[in-house]
C-alpha cells in the first residue's frame, strides 16, 4: 500500500513536509520530489523557445529571432513546492552570438501554481512578475487560478541576472509596479 512505501522510503523530514494529505497523494508527492525539474509549459514564440531535446523537458533553449531585440519566454514546471527548502541548478550558456550583440540576461524565480497557461492564449511576452504596465492585464487572469492553499499575497518572486536583484509580485495590487531591492549575495 502507499502507506508502506512511504514508511519504508520517506525520511522523517519528508514525512513532516508531506503530512496532512492522503497516503496516495503523499506517495505521488514523494515520487515527484525525487524527479528532475521538468518544464511542462513553454510560453512564448514557438520559433524562439523549445526543448533542446524533445524527449527531455528539463533542458530548454531560447534563441534570438529578432534583430537584436529582447526575446521573452517563460518556462513553468508543474511541480509544486510546499514547505521546506528547495534547490535547483541552472546551466546558462550563450552559443553563436556575436561580440557586438547584447549579452543575454535571465530572470529565474518561483510562481504560484498555474496550470495550462501554455494552452490559454498567445502570451508571447508573458512575465509572471507582471510589473510592466502592459502586463497588468494578466494579474486578474492569474488570480483566477487562486486556491485556498495560496495563503498570503506573495505570488511570484524572481532574481534578475543583469541587475543582481530580487523582485516580488503581489497580483492583488492593480496599479503599482513591485520592486523590492533585496540585497543579493555576490
Image: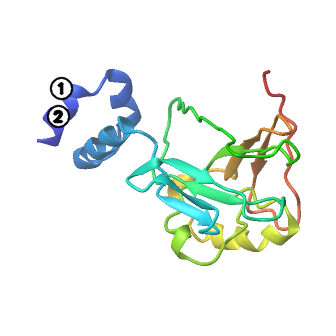
Q: Position of residue 181 (x, y in %)?
A: 87, 37
> At 49% from the left edge and 41% from the top edge, which residue is drawn?
82
Residue 77 percent location from the top left of the image: 50, 52
Crowding at dot 2, Cα within 10 Å, few <14 / some 14-19 / many 20+, comes out as: few
Q: Is residue 112 visible?
A: no
- From this viewpoint, which residue is outermost toward the left? 1
Q: Residue furthest bottom?
A: 121
Residue occupied by mark 2: 5
- Seen in the picture, residue 103 relative to 78 is either above or below; the reply is above
Q: Is residue 89 left or right of residue 14?
A: right
Identify which residue is drawn at 38% across, 37% down.
33
Residue 160 in view of the camera: yes
Give the total number of marks visible in the rendering.
2
Q: With respect to residue 112, does 87 lie above or below?
A: above
Which residue position holds label 1? 8
Q: Are marks 2 and 1 in contact (CB under 8 Å)?
A: yes
The quarter of the displayed image where residue 136 is located: bottom right
In the image, residue 36 lies at what x, y percent? 41, 39
Left/right placement of residue 100 relative to residue 76 reads right
Q: CA distance from mark 2 to mark 1?
A: 5 Å
Q: Which quadrant does the N terminus fall into?
A: top left
The quarter of the picture where the C terminus appears is: top right
On the picture, is 68 further left or further right than 20?
Answer: right
Amino acid at each position: 500500500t502507499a502507506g508502506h512505501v512511504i514508511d519504508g522510503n520517506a525520511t522523517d523530514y519528508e514525512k513532516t513536509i508531506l503530512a496532512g494529505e492522503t497516503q496516495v497523494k503523499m506517495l505521488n508527492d514523494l515520487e515527484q520530489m525525487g524527479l528532475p525539474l521538468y518544464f511542462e509549459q513553454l510560453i512564448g514564440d514557438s520559433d524562439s523557445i523549445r526543448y533542446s531535446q524533445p524527449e527531455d523537458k528539463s533542458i530548454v533553449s531560447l534563441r534570438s529571432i529578432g534583430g537584436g531585440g529582447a526575446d521573452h519566454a517563460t518556462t513553468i514546471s508543474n511541480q509544486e513546492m510546499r514547505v521546506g527548502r528547495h534547490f535547483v541548478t541552472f546551466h546558462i550558456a550563450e552559443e553563436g552570438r556575436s561580440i557586438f550583440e547584447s549579452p543575454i540576461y535571465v530572470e529565474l524565480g518561483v510562481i504560484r501554481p498555474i496550470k495550462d497557461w501554455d494552452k490559454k492564449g498567445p502570451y508571447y511576452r508573458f512575465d509572471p512578475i507582471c510589473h510592466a504596465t502592459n502586463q497588468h492585464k494578466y494579474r486578474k487572469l492569474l488570480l483566477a487560478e487562486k486556491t485556498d492553499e495560496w495563503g498570503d499575497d506573495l505570488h511570484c518572486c524572481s532574481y534578475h541576472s543583469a541587475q543582481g536583484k530580487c523582485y516580488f509580485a503581489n497580483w492583488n495590487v492593480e496599479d503599482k509596479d513591485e520592486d523590492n531591492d533585496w540585497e543579493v549575495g555576490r
